[in-house]
Amino acid sequence: MRFVWAVAAFVLAAVMIGAGIAQRTIFQGPRTETTAISAEDDTPYLLIDGAVLNQLPGTQTLRAQAPGDLFASYGRTADMQAWLSDSSYTHVTLGDDGGLDTAVVEPEQTAAEGDTGDDTASTEDPAAGGADAPGEGDAAADGDAATDDATEATAGRSPVGSDLWLDEYQQKDLLIAPLQLPEGMSVLVASDGTAPAPSKVTVTWPLQTSTPWAGPLIVGGGILMAVGVFLYILGIRHARRKRGPRRKGLPLPVTEPIDIATAEGDKGVISSSRARTRRSVGSGRRAFAVLPVVAVSALLFSGCSADAWPQLAPTPTPTPTTTVVAPEGQQAPAVTKAQAERILTRISATVADADAAMDGDLADTRLEGAALAARDTNYKLRGAIADYPAPAPILAKPLEIILPQAFDSWPRSVIAVADDETSKTSSIMIMTQQDAWADYKVSYIGSLEASTSLPKLAPAYIGAPQIEPDSPFLLLPPDEVAAAYSDIINKGEESEFYDLFESDGDQLRESIAADRQRRLDEFNQTGATTGNLQFSSAAGSQPPFALQTVESGAIVAVNINELDTVTPTNPDAVIKLLDNPTVKALTGVEQSATGFVTTYSDQVFFYVPGPGSNEKIRLLGYSSDLLDAKVIS
């Protein structure tokens, strides 16, 4: 009977294991779903709408195949359409019936020029020469040539390295890009912006094909097989015991008497050896029979993933966390944090190369405004003075704070704070993108002390709206902050704006006062009787910039100019630049009978609270650089 149960266990185990394996193989079905995207038109760009990528749940794998270099990037759909607005491209969207719709989108600018040309031709006066009028015909031809040139120029624009992309991929011959795009994103596929975009493009999604009973069947079958083996061993053992010894004793020949003690001792040794041998052989057989079953069961068990088991545990409920909700109608943030880190890394590398080569044109590709003006002066001075120090590098990582402007159009800006682990200070900067095709440029940059406390800012995924320069909803409008602070520098406590600004911790005012007193003492040692040194401050030429904070205040960046004016008081005296190589290098002269004006540029960041706040305007960070020096005419 034991053999019957063992055979039944073997058969049932084989059926269970076979059924479990079949669920994971031949009965499981396809693991992925693939959609082919065909672009028959030879346009240089292929834009795949986000709805195409999200028609199935899960991550997406984009594949593009074509000879040569291949490129793919993703970003917000509106941003990509703006970047492609002056070019012809193929747009792939999801139709109402669930199929893919492919259409060629023509450049907006070219279409507008074409319409203008057609209207002009239709209103020509035949009496004046009609279509053969030389002046109008030439103008139309010139317009068509200009349109063709514009189309060729935009078609040849490479998409590689644009600051607009959230991420990009570059490979040769075959491009594979794993994606997981949310709603509102699209993918751009191209080669180099001139050659046609790849025509063989596919999107693949993983399919959720779970087999919850495969694991229990395989493991249960393995256990049942082990039970069958055990029953089989018991059956063999029972059969052997039931059969017993059946041989009769043979007659012994007549022998000589033997020593009984010796015989019993030998017999005992022989019996013990045989018993030990039988036990060893029996144990080996059981181990040999059970070991393969355990090994096979363990192997099958290890091959079952989580989707091969029934999910008996309840699905965990996410715990709500404190979030900041964007105001109704607020637009999307200009960049993401990862995008800002990549942009700052590019800016830092480009400016470092420009600093090393003292190349103002290269610096102009990533700097503008007050930041660029300070760099240009530094390059000029380093070219004339061997030991003049290089400017501080622009920090890119680690990026601690990012506050993008919430704005869908252009220009759009970002406030970023990066730490300098060497000097234990931080840099605060503003970078701006003027249009969809431009790179981000740093316009303001300053240093934050370790003790500086920034106001509460909106998270990067929400962003903040820009404050208008003349906004009345702050303690002081942004376009009046520079002039008011300059008045405090000039007049001190006598300024009408003194009570609006926090004086405690204002290191800029302290450093300006100390530096002015030092230079005045040095000047009076030799020129007190023949010359006059005066100091003044005024708002600089760079426009202010402000982004709103959470408490209805704003971070405001302004430009302030400090002017040092030295003039002779004696008509026979001249001002000599004996110990001032910087002014000598900028003016190109060593002395002047009319005097000199030296300008220092301050890039200053303030926190300006709202009008109902009890706080004062607080200095956050700043940088000061020599800007210019001129001879008084």
Image: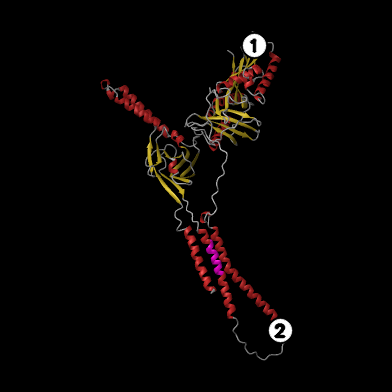
Q: Which residue is mark 2?
A: 263
Please state which of the two labelled residues, at mark 2 or mark 1, is closer to the viewer.
Answer: 2
Tell which of 1 and 103 is nearer to you. Answer: 1
Give the side of residue 48 with respect to residue 396, left or right: left
**Residue 578 locus on image (x, y percent):** 66, 17
Name the residue at 44% across, 49% down. 33
**Residue 514 locus on image (x, y percent):** 68, 21
**Residue 393 locus on image (x, y percent):** 60, 31
Q: How would you rate the neighbour count of disc 1 (Cα within 10 Å): few for under 14, some for 14-19, many for 20 or more? A: many
Tell which of 390 and 601 is nearer to you. Answer: 601
Tell which of 267 and 195 is nearer to you. Answer: 267
Q: Secondary structure at mark 2?
A: helix
Q: Which residue is mark 1?
A: 568
C-alpha separation, residue under disc 2 versus residue under disc 1: 139 Å
**Which image quadrant is residue 227 in?**
bottom right
Range covered by the magenta-colored residues: 219-229
- Compared to residue 291, the image places residue 515 above or below, namely above
Q: Secondary structure at mark 1?
A: strand
- Counting residues from the N terminus, which is met first, the one under dot 2 or under dot 1? 2
Q: How would you rate the neighbour count of disc 2 (Cα within 10 Å): few for under 14, some for 14-19, many for 20 or more? A: few
Name the residue at 55% across, 58% down. 302
- Compared to residue 196, the image places residue 535 above or below, namely above
Task: Residue type at mark 2: give it.
Answer: Ala
Q: Is residue 222 magenta?
A: yes
**Residue 243 locus on image (x, y percent):** 58, 80
Task: Residue type at mark 1: give it.
Answer: Pro
Q: Is residue 1 magenta?
A: no
